[in-house]
Image (tube, helix red, strand yellow):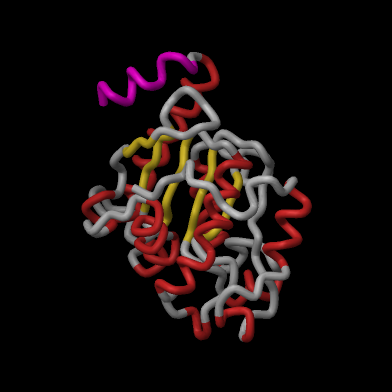
Amino acid sequence: MLNLNQETPYDNLPLDDFKNTVLSCQQCELCHTRTNVVFGSGPIPCNLMIIGEGPGEQEDLQSLPFVGRSGKLLTKILEYVSINRDTDVFIANTVKCRPPNNRTPLQAEIDSCKPYLIRQIKLVKPKILLLLGSPSLKTILEETLTITKTRGKWYKTIVDYMSDPLYIMPLFHPSYLLRNSSQEEGKPKWLTWQDMKEVKSVLRFYEQNPVQVNKILVDT
């Protein structure tokens, strides 16, 4: 598990200064091929945070996360459980710049962005963190198992910004769901609907009974 309490060079920066630092980043080779840095979007702080892989073509052009085909599906998935992506969730990526030809981010690129991601989590202060796809799974959980083995399972870690643990669930990436579009029971899209219903129920319970969330997740 990545230590989300570790110090970063940005811990003393207020949000606006931190964001400006990220937007002008030159920490890895992706700065030479990007059009825009994609900082993330959503309210800060926020109970729910989503971390994806990296910006695609449309995200790079618009400087916003998940605005292409995968983003439209993500919006639909959130709406399915009455989560408003503009007001109820902060969305970020493992890397802030688009890898050329939408390739998987290199480890060096992920490592360059890790301090940014850790600082974002500290600022957003999520109670639930959703990891979309393998790169975010491996970055946050440092997990060697595949997404198919870990999706829908709750993980937890201690964070300094709240007394309760941070609960983390890996999910299939929307781009994977676009390639596997069957809604038949047991298929990836159907499984994602079930996972999101559980996430929503925990979010709702958290808002109503915050001190009891640890118990209901331990018991599931």
Residue at the image position 57 percent from the left and 36 percent from the top: 125
Left or right position of 102 against 144: right
Task: Find residue 90 and report its horizontal and vertical position in percent.
Answer: 60, 46
SS assignment for the magenta stretch, majority: helix
Q: Is residue 215 above or below residue 162?
A: above
Front residue of 194/131: it is 131
Residue 179 falls inside the magenta stretch: no
Which residues, given as a range, are shown in magenta? Answer: 210-220
Residue at the image position 72 percent from the left and 57 percent from the top: 19
Front residue of 38/20: it is 20
Task: Find residue 88 and report its horizontal and vertical position in percent.
Answer: 62, 38
Quarter of the image holding residue 174? bottom left
Left or right position of 42 against 154: right
Residue at the image position 49 percent from the left and 48 percent from the top: 77
Front residue of 4/166: it is 4
Task: Find residue 186 and report its horizontal and vertical position in percent.
Answer: 23, 50
Front residue of 87/108: it is 108
Left or right position of 33 against 4: right
The number of numbered discs placed on residues in the rendered structure image is 0
Residue at the image position 34 percent from the left and 59 percent from the top: 138
Quarter of the image with the C terminus is top left
Task: Find residue 78 and report its horizontal and vertical position in percent.
Answer: 53, 45
